[in-house]
Amino acid sequence: MNAAEEWARHWRYPGLPGLELLHARYVSHSFSRHSHEGFVFGAVRGGIEDVVLQGETLRARPGTVVMINPEVPHAAHAGVPEGWTYATLYPSSQLIADIAAEVTTLRGTAGFAETIVEDPDTSLLIQEVHRAAEQGNALAADTVFRIAVARLLRRHGQSLPARTTGSAGARTAAAARALLEERLVDPPSLERLAHDLGTSPFALLRAFKGAYGLPPHTWLTGERVRRARLLLEAGTAPAEAAVAVGFTDQPHLNRHFTRIVGVTPGVYRRERARTYKNAGAPPT
């Protein structure tokens, strides 16, 4: 990352449990195709971010809000030469479910049908959450966050359809995912994986992409990065975390980690250590 042009802070504020924050300016940086366990709410302050989702490129400008549901694969890059500056919130699914239950009549799993909406006042609220958190004002940060989420749910929320889990393809995909989780460091080939599950490679590939939106190898990279994040938060050195989750070495981890998380593993680890120190409690 060119320090003269790009900067990023990916952090947690102890006053907002269940929430991660990213405040950044990117020019040449791009996010590879990945997904998150929780939600994504992004507000562009300057420039344009191109969000690529389900083969479609959507343009996020100032005044819009990007809303991405959990486990929805997406990628992103600059939409103009000067890049984009934005504030992003990553709340857990449980946090959004709790707010939805309190302020809406949505049934089942609450989420969003649209990815980008014109909503200037909520965009400003997302940026205000960052300002309050950076100032250490927990009351303001929590209040504004909940108001912003309530507005998004009331204006744009809907009940998401339940995932289909009973089909043969879904069961095969789930079994493949479980095997890959077990063999994170030494995964089998697609052919071997398909053979062990009693199917063909292309049938497995179709089933896995249908269930998770990503081919197995791309999903595996994202899962390795998620596991590396947990290790880094616990204080593990990046080089050790890389080997522990199946990357060849630290540069291999650095490349994939940065293209998914938005900062390097070293920066991520230092920021988490500072967060826990300020909170007066060790990571769990």
Image (cartoon, helix red, strand yellow):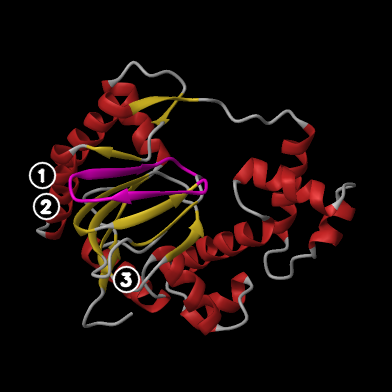
Q: Are marks 1 and 2 in contact (CB under 8 Å)?
A: yes
The residue drawn where x is 60% and y is 70% is 245
Q: Depth check: 219 or 205 in front?
A: 205
Residue 28 drawn at (x, y percent): 34, 74
Q: Depth check: 217 or 231 in front?
A: 217
Amino acid type of the residue that numbered disc 3 sits on in the rendered structure: Ala
Quadrant in which residue 115 is drawn: top left
Name the residue carrying label 1.
Answer: 140
Q: Are there few (<14), some (14-19), or many (20+) residues within 10 Å of tag 1?
A: some
Name the residue carrying label 3.
Answer: 273
Q: Which residues are magenta?
A: 54-71
State the SS at label 1. Answer: helix
Amino acid type of the residue that numbered disc 1 sits on in the rendered structure: Ala
Name the residue carrying label 2.
Answer: 132
Which numbered disc, 3 or 2, marks the residue that appears first in the sequence?
Answer: 2
Does residue 80 appear left or right of residue 262 in this picture?
left
The residue drawn where x is 25% and y is 65% is 24
Judge whether residue 143 can be spotted in this image.
Answer: no
